Every structure is written in structure tokens, then in C-alpha cells.
Amino acid sequence: MTGQAWLIVAFTVVAVALLAAAFGRAILHALGYELAPIAPARTPHEELRGAMADLQREDSVVKQDRDRVGGLLDLHELEVSDVMVHRLNMRSVNADDAPEAVVREILQSPHTRMPLWRGSLDNIVGVLHAKDLLRALNDVGNDFAKVDIMKIASKPWFVPDTTSLQDQLNAFLRRKAHFAIVVDEYGEVEGLVTLEDIIEEIVGEIADEHDVDIQGVKQEADGSVVVDGTVPIRDLNRALDWNLPDDEATTIAGLVIHEARSIPEEKQAFTFYGKRFTVLKRDKNRLASVRIRPAVEG
């Protein structure tokens, strides 16, 4: 039986069990009986997680299907800060630059939408869609200097970094939007989140012909893995089928710093969660590169 068939069986079993329990309680209630709760009832999410755990133990579900169901169930537990593009990696354009420079920057970008700022990155004043830019260029005979950037830019949408992915997904669908700027409690820009970022939490990485390969994870011949410090823990877990915790840190660098209780120096090594982490490169207070290998047993 295929992994997908097992998923259908698991969902069906859970649904039948819940319906049968509800039907039994209704009959007893009609006869004047009440069932005293022995233990808190498991939520539908917990029932599905339990079914997936059973299938995983039995090796009855393929990794891709397990990841997709797990990603779907995790949406209400994760926040946009867990999947956003951090401001350090966020491409943006100074709206006060000459129109020619802004147009060239956007046309050379692999992204469809680009945030515009004035004064500092914390002052996002608009978001420019490449399709709107192309229409504007057509209207002025492709004369870059005649394009009014702010006139064709849309108003930025700011969302709190603590918004759950489930709520953000619903908001994207409700507003028919694809792009939002993530801010912290002080209104400072932390990054950006897109509809694609959330969908990728369910189905995995979505690549197209315009995507740029990012050298974030490199497997070495000796079995170790060299990882950029900014690589999200969840992405690494999904790619390598690891189980590193992501409740206290979002990135690999954050995990090492959290466990070390300090900012390690280059060549320092630490062992935790069954792995050996060695700092390869440090850029000021940022861990730029980390080597990870299985911890030596015994």
C-alpha cells in the first residue's frame, strides 16, 4: 500500500472514531446518562498527529507525505517570524534613488515584488510589482527616467512577527494578497513574508525557472554538512530528515548560540542533540558558517 493510501486510511479511521464517539455520547445523553470525563479529549490535530506517528513507526508513509501533513498541522503553532525572509537577506530599493536606478534594480531582481524605503529600512513606503513597472514603462515608451515609482507602488501591508502561519495564510487569502512586511512590537522591520513561504511549509521548496540557487547547505565527502548560519532549522530538518529543536531558535546560528550560552569563536566545537557543531567562520557577532557531523558515540 502506498504512502498516500495509508494517509487516506489514517484520516478515515480518525474520522470514523470521532463520529462513533459523538454518536455514542448522544445516545447515552438521550437515555439520561452522562459520561464523566476521565481525561481531556484529544483535539483533531492531536488525533492526526497520533495517526501519523503510528504510521511513521511502521514505515508505512513516505517522507514527503509525512512532511506535508506535518507542515499542515504545524501552521497554527508556527509564527511568521519562523518562515520570513530576514531583513539581512531582504532585497529592497531606496525610493529616493533616481528612477533609472530603481527600475534597473527591480528588473534585475529575481523577485516579483520589491519593498521601497526612504531614510532607513524601517521606513517602508511602498511595494512595487514588476508587472506594474512593465506597464508603466510601456506607457512612457520605455524611458526609465519618466517612470513615477511611487505612483505605481502599492501601499505596504505590515503584520506582527507573532502572527501564526494559519492566521497569516487566512489573511493572505482573504485580502487576495501575496506579500507582507513583518514588524516587531516596536514597529521595526524584521523581514518579509509571502504566500509562497507559507505554502512551502506544507509542500516543501517550490522552485521555478527564475529562482536563484542559494548556497546554504553543502554535504561534504566525509559525511559532514557545512551550513550557513542563516539557514532555518526547519529547512535543514526537512532536507536531511533531522530532528533539531526549533522552539528556542530559528536558525542554525541561533541554535548554536543558544546551546553555547555565548557567541562562539571560530574553530570552537559543541556537541548536542546527537550532532557535533564546529564554527567555521564568524563575522563580527554573527556565525556565518557551521560544520555539522554526527557525534562520536562512546
Image (spheres, helix red, strand yellow):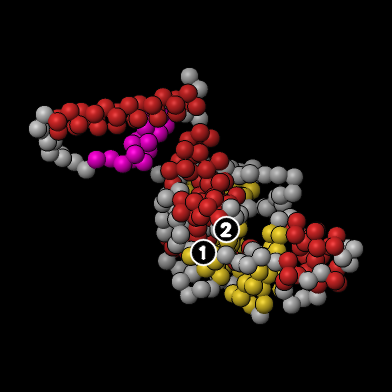
Which residue occupies 78% across, 71% down?
148
Is disc 1 placed on a helix, strand or loop?
Answer: strand
**Is 59 left, or right, of 117 in this rendering?**
left
2 and 1 marks in contact (CB < 8 Å): yes
Dominant secondary structure of the residues highlighted in magenta in the image: helix
- Front residue of 18/47: it is 18
Among the 4 quarters of the image, the one containing residue 266: bottom right
Say the numbered circle drawn on residue 136.
Answer: none
Label count reads: 2
> What x and y, as percent, mark residue 57?
39, 30
Q: Which residue is mark 2?
A: 193
Is disc 2 placed on a helix, strand or loop?
Answer: strand
Q: Which residue is mark 1?
A: 159
Which residue occupies 42% across, 32% down?
56
Mark 2 vs mark 1: in front:
1
Reply yes or no: does residue 245 show up in magenta.
Answer: no
Residue placed furthest toward the top: 1
Badge 1, how many Cα within 10 Å: few under 14, some, many 20+?
some
> What x and y, as percent, mark residue 164?
45, 55
User: Which stretch is magenta?
Assistant: 41-56
Q: Amino acid at mark 2?
A: Val
Q: Is residue 165 visible?
A: no
- Front residue of 217/281: it is 217
- Classify 39 as above or below 144: above
Label 2 to label 1: alpha-carbon separation: 9 Å
Which residue occupies 58% across, 53% down?
176
Among the 4 quarters of the image, the one containing residue 120: bottom right
Badge 2, how many Cα within 10 Å: few under 14, some, many 20+?
many
